[in-house]
Image: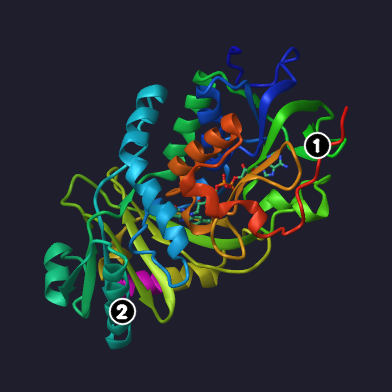
Amino acid sequence: MQSSHTGQHPDISTSSDVLVVGGGIIGLVTAWRAAQRGLRTAVADPEPGGGAAQVAAGMLAAVTELHYGEETLLGLNLASAERYPAFVAELEAVSGRDTGYRACGTLAVALDADDRAHLRELHGFQQRSGLSSEWLSGRECRRLEPMLAPGVRGGLRVDGDHQIDPRRLAAALVTACERAGVIFHRSFASRLTVVRDRASGVVLADGRALSADQTVLAGGSLSGRLAGLPTDVVPPVRPVKGQVLRLSVPGPYAPFLSRSVRAVVRGSHVYLVPRENGELVVGATSEEQGWDTTVTAGGVYELLRDAHELVPGITELPFTEARAGLRPASPDNAPLLGPSALPGLHLATGHYRNGVLLTPVTGDAMADVLTTGELPEVARPFTPRRFSPAPVRQEQPA
Ligand SMILES: Cc1cc2nc3c(=O)[nH]c(=O)nc-3n(C[C@H](O)[C@H](O)[C@H](O)COP(=O)(O)OP(=O)(O)OC[C@H]3O[C@@H](n4cnc5c(N)ncnc54)[C@H](O)[C@@H]3O)c2cc1C
């Protein structure tokens, strides 16, 4: 295995077994797991550890985010949630960094009769799907979380939906990659190189050419924009903007909230995620605005208005940050994992609103496919080929 490099270096190797384009949490976990399996691995990204994880709330919400029509995705979400404790323990031990993982559970509440009916229906769907959640009256919800508005009409207690701090997760993954010998090329990949109908690496924006036996495209919402991708291989991934606020709960008082709390207010989802260090994350808008990441007065207003309806006391808290990020969304809201129709090119993208939750299972699935050529059972339904019926190209002989 090669020694670790953290910055640009003139003698940095330009060839590897695996080259990951994009160093968000998905690219990083792929690189870390691939390097652990003995593959010489490199990542190209101007700012590894950046991306949507700098904005995301970090809810690990397999059960509370159950949606009709997403039963297949539920299997992957649950598989990843199950891996989380061991994944975090290993990552923290290897990196020496805390990830802010908190096994605190989630409470989804209803503010009016319509919300209550909707939550009741979700509860039934969860039960039919074999998931664990408990119906609570409004009073029981407030006993659990005394800061909730008096008008809360009922709720679902889900003790298995936890949280992690995605910024710390990303930082820990960068360190774990460095320690596993992953080479970082801190530059944008401007073009995929294809030789005889096989992906063979990329050309970087700074002009350097990188070669690799296998290239993994993990560019988040930018994945479809890499030049040089054959048209039928371009992943159908689009950006869905989310604005998020951060408040802080001054310590060392009694906790403001002890678990994540969420609701649907006037049709918009709002959640409050309390971190152990006093940070309170309030999210999130969902907007189809292309690659725009402007924080708008309307976005901030709506989030504060809805969160205030849920937990009136938030208006007393110091306001520390407002930021927007882009969820990489696919046509069926599920990720694209594994070989594309172009030999030598894999995809690990389209994780949409569950990318933090799906980090452990994605790392394992990508390491499997990179070492054996086969996706594990749990990841097979998420092959990119479900969107490209075109036959897989045959490589041209050298
Ligand atoms: C507001 C919001 C709230 C969220 N909340 C949650 C949540 O509570 N729970 C949850 O599980 N998920 C959540 N998510 C989703 C989660 O953050 C994403 O699914 C996940 O971060 C996607 O990671 P990624 O690595 O695929 O993409 P990204 O984070 O977008 O990273 C892609 C990286 O690739 C780089 N890149 C792109 N193209 C190139 C190129 N050509 N060359 C080099 N580098 C390139 C980019 O610079 C970037 O660093 C949320 C997202 C948002 C925006």
Query: Compared with residue 10, is residue 239 higher up or lower down, i.e. above or below?
Result: below
Q: Is residue 74 left or right of residue 149?
A: right
Marks 1 and 2, Cα distance to the nearest angstrom? 49 Å
Q: Nearer the viewer, residue 144 or 313?
A: 144
Q: Position of residue 33 (x, y in %)?
A: 51, 30
Describe the element under mark 2 as helix, strand or loop. helix
Q: Residue at x 25, y 46 (%)?
A: 103
Identify residue type, mark 2. Answer: Glu
Residue drawn at 48 percent across, 32 percent down? 173
- Front residue of this view, candidates 279 and 120: 120
Answer whether residue 245 is visible to the viewer in this image: yes
Is residue 373 one of those drawn in magenta? no
Instruction: Report the side of 54 relative to 66 (left or right).
Output: right
Tag 1 secondary structure: strand
User: Where on the picture, by quarter, is residue 47?
Assistant: top right
The range drawn in magenta is 304-311
Who is closer to the viewer here, 396 or 99? 396
The image shows residue 321 at horizontal and vertical percentages of: 46, 53
Residue 149 image position (x, y, % from top left):
22, 74
Q: Earlier in the sequence, mark 1 or mark 2?
A: 2
- Mark count: 2
Dominant secondary structure of the residues highlighted in magenta in the image: helix
Q: Is residue 28 visible?
A: no
In this rendering, the label closer to the viewer, 1 or 2: 1
Give the quarter of the figure containing the N terminus. Answer: top right
**Is the residue marked by circle 1 packed among few (<14), some (14-19), or many (20+) residues within 10 Å?**
some
The residue drawn where x is 75% and y is 20% is: 14
Task: State how the image is colored.
Answer: rainbow
- Residue for badge 2: 121
Q: Give residue 247's quadrant in the image.
A: bottom left
Label 1: which residue? 198
